[in-house]
Image (spheres, rainbow, N blue to C red):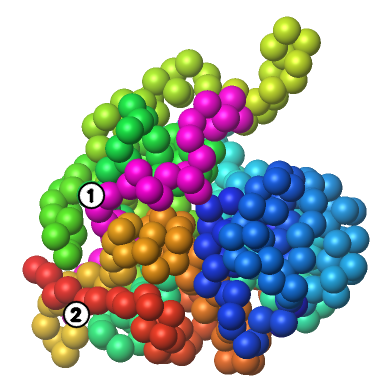
Amino acid sequence: MKVLLVGVGGVGEAIAVIGKDKPWLETLVLSDYNLDRVREVHQKLGSPAHMPVEFIDAGDRAQVVALIQKHQADLLMNAVDPVFNEALFDAAFEAGINYMDMAMTLSSPHADRPHEACGVKLGDYQFERAEEWEKKGLLALVGMGVEPGMADVFARYAEKHLFDEIEEIGVRDGANLEVRGYDFAPNFSIWTTIEECLNPPVIWEQERGWYTTPPFSEPEVFEFPEGIGPVECVNVEHEEVLLVPRWVKCGRVTFKYGLGDEFIGILKTIKMLGLDNKDPINVKGVRVAPRDVVAACLPDPAHLGDHMFGKTCAGTWVKGTKDGKPRQVYLYQVADNETCMRDFGVQAVVWQTAVNPVIAMELIEAGIWKGAGVLGPEAFDPDPFIERMPGYDFPWGMKEMG
């Protein structure tokens, strides 16, 4: 497989680290707008010949198509902020190759009832073009990170093996990670964090369909495994709620994230000051997006690994019945930052995200996961993915609850 990797930030670097020695990966083109960053990662990996370095403007569709053609890529792997998703998704289609991302095209709140009804939903742009992709025989695998991604595979696995009927599926993400030496330092892209946390969260119910609530709604305390313990989680906009109901039969789907009061307070302040705006404004004759300024003022999550301590947990809680009896389980993956830094040289959050698209690449290259159109992880057999997780030093667990 020949892959054009667009974006060599924290997750992009981790994808390169994980994929470097995979025999099925013939070429992995490392491309980014920040060429110094690409060279840094390339050198860190030992300057491998099958990982050429390229400059790319992810918003320039023609340039992306030209780079695909130059390297005869089979797959475009999108590892940049989702503001570029439409351009990259369209570039892959124009070039006639498969596409994969870890976050779908962006949403827009409902103009009149943002906290009740959906406007443009996550992934709408992509799903509206699904028939065109299918007719062309191309695959766009969307939402193939950890959440969404692995969490969706867990949902499909639970339906296939663990339940006769599913009442509710809830993705729950929590951690006890600390970033020491900074007053405020998110461990993942602040651009993406602002987008998903300040937009109205989406909930899906069988009788009602998709609807929205105010940010940070329905707080609950969830008990996370492997020493993390109880963490208060709140509703956050996330792709799983838009993906799972398309392929998994259930009654309700939610996504809740353990943010903490301090983090929520900072996000509310950013919103109040208008610093969440992703559209450029005029500042003394210079056009700049306020959100880009916030991101530029904060430390790069890709370089925070040595300052991070603790564990992060991603997983899927499922409630339903099996053999006529009520059942609740939590399928999860826990990443310890010290272990990730020691074994892979990248911090836990980006490593946990990056393993999943690499496993998916292997399954696509082997012809095990195949299809055409715009598909989520739930559209495929979960077993080959689950079976490969231990071989990637990516163990998973299951906790009976209730």
User: Which labelled disc corresponds to residue 6?
Assistant: none
Q: Within 10 Å of the Cα at label 1, are there few (<14), some (14-19), or many (20+) other Cα atoms? A: some
Q: Quadrant of the C terminus?
A: bottom left
The residue shown at (32%, 64%) is 339
The residue shown at (45%, 61%) is 345
Quadrant housing residue 337: bottom left
Q: Is mark 1 on a helix, strand or loop?
A: loop
Query: Is residue 325 left or right of 392 when viewed as pictured?
Result: left
Amino acid on which the number 1 mark rests in the picture: Asn
Seen from the viewer's position, the closer of residues 202 and 40 is 40
Does the magenta run of residues contain 302? yes
Query: Is residue 34 left or right of 94 when viewed as pictured?
Result: left
Query: Could you tell which of marks 1 and 2 lies nearer the N-terminus?
Result: 1
Query: Is residue 236 left or right of 99 when viewed as pictured?
Result: left
Q: Is mark 2 on a helix, strand or loop?
A: strand
Measured as percent of width and height from the top left, residue 67 is found at: 86, 62
User: Which labelled disc corresponds to residue 321?
Assistant: 2
Q: Can residue 316 be seen in this view?
A: no
Quadrant housing residue 216: top left
Q: Within 10 Å of the Cα at label 2, are there few (<14), some (14-19), or many (20+) other Cα atoms? A: some
Measured as percent of width and height from the top left, residue 245 is found at: 44, 67
Q: What is the distance, in whole Å, between disc 1 and disc 2 at their CAs?
A: 32 Å
The residue shown at (14%, 75%) is 400
Tell me the magenta residue range.
Answer: 292-321
Measured as percent of width and height from the top left, residue 226 is found at: 17, 65
Residue, disc 1 = 176
Q: Is residue 88 visible?
A: yes
